[in-house]
Amino acid sequence: MIVKEEVRKMKTVAPLVAALDNSARCNALKKVAEKLQERQAEIFAENKKDLEEAAKNGVADQIVKRLKFNEGKLADVVAGINQLITLEDPIGKITLDRELDEGLELTRVTTPIGVIGVIFEARPDALIQISSLCIRSGNCPVLKGGKETTFTNRILFEIIYGAVLEAGFPEGCMLMCEQHNEIDELLTCEGLVDLLIPRGSNKFVQYIMNNTRIPVMGHADGICHIYVDKDADFDKAIPVIIDAKIQYTAACNAVETLLIHRDIAEEFVPKLAAALKENGVTLRGTKEVTDILDKEGTSADYETIGEEDFKEYLALIVSAKLVDGVDEAINHINTRGSHHTDSIITENDETADRFLQLVDSAGVYRNCSTRFADGFRYGFGAEVGISTSKIHARGPVGLTGLVTYKYMLRGNGHIVGDYASGKKSFHFKDL
């Protein structure tokens, strides 16, 4: 397949998809949900092939967790599709209506972005979520999944694309790339692809950003923090930390670094270490942290790290460091984090408000798990990815992150010369 030629055709189809009304897009999603359920046995059979290949090739456990697609994941994605159908139409919303002069009316109207290239990791459910969001928001997706899910992605794409064509969408409204070299070709499609959304490792995302002139939206790392304040309730803190680490360890919103107030460290760290051990999590603490555990003589699984050794693990490992207070925690997060999702555990309203105000991340939480950073859990139906950018979209990117806008001006023979000469003047009246 010559990607550029296929994308060029898609660019001409994109306005037709954008013009489809709300009912047509919702009906297409209903058909997608029906077909996925009708053909689930085929999907699971293809996913089994991917899992067998992964076992043969020694694929890492965290990737295997992501690529496994079973009844539970199918139920989740179908629920996400059904939720998307109930959401307000993101297209055609008037966000500005202004009369510039009599008979000269300006409106700003939301429109689809157009052609969106999404390059994502080995998660079959990601293909469904991305496709569904693009269908609902009137965009045309170019999809490239991880090679580990080749068989599953192939059957899912066949089902989804077939369903939308059956629902009246135009030919060429969706495209899937399978070969690795097609990524590089996709990166050259400036002027044809309107937006790229990469989902993967820091190295991969940086590669995409450095090798294309197409706008890129997304995040490179998921170094998420939980700060346990001196006014924390331990009975809240430990379950929140455990959930944030183990509920889905390979997710980008799993906690990777714990910051603990020194005033509570002697009491809290041993309790934390015991809970982590019980859940199979290795604690990698700075010397201050591990000195406390050495003194306690605990049997917890821990090791000492340096001040520069904080990173994203995507595994049953968590780093820990002691801090003097909320300001040191905020500074560590803003300078060492990835601006993804960070949480504070505290019963002190003033401290919590300071944290929420000053931490410069896409998601900032109080007394809850970082794992809530998710489009479905936010009520978006699904997400195409998480953005740590501040331009256009931030946090979980749902329907509202997949639209832009255009200005429509309706007049009656108006000319700029009349206003430049002073014959006429603007009166700018919001309608």
Image (cartoon, rainbow, N blue to C red):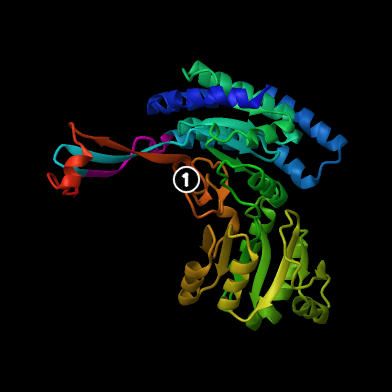
Q: Position of residue 123 (x, y in %)?
A: 68, 38
- From this view, report whether residue 199 is shown above or below residue 169: below
For label 1, the residue is 379
- From this view, report whether residue 107 is shown above or below residue 139: below
User: Is 210 or 248 nearer to us in this picture?
Assistant: 210
Q: Give left or right: position of 137 versus 316.
A: left
Asked whether residue 222 is drawn in magenta, I would say no
Q: Position of residue 93 (x, y in %)?
A: 33, 39
Q: Which residues make up the magenta segment?
A: 86-98
Q: Position of residue 411 (x, y in %)?
A: 20, 34
Q: Position of residue 228 (x, y in %)?
A: 61, 72
Q: Quadrant of residue 8?
A: top right
- From this view, report whether residue 62 is shown above or below residue 35: below
Label 1: which secondary element: loop
Q: Give left or right: position of 182 versus 334.
A: right
Q: Quadrant of the N terminus?
A: top right
| Res 74 visible | no
| Res 146 visible | yes
Q: Quadrant of the C terminus?
A: top left
Taking the spot 47% from the left edge, 45% from the top edge, the residue there is 379
Check the image and name the residue furthest to the front.
Answer: 421
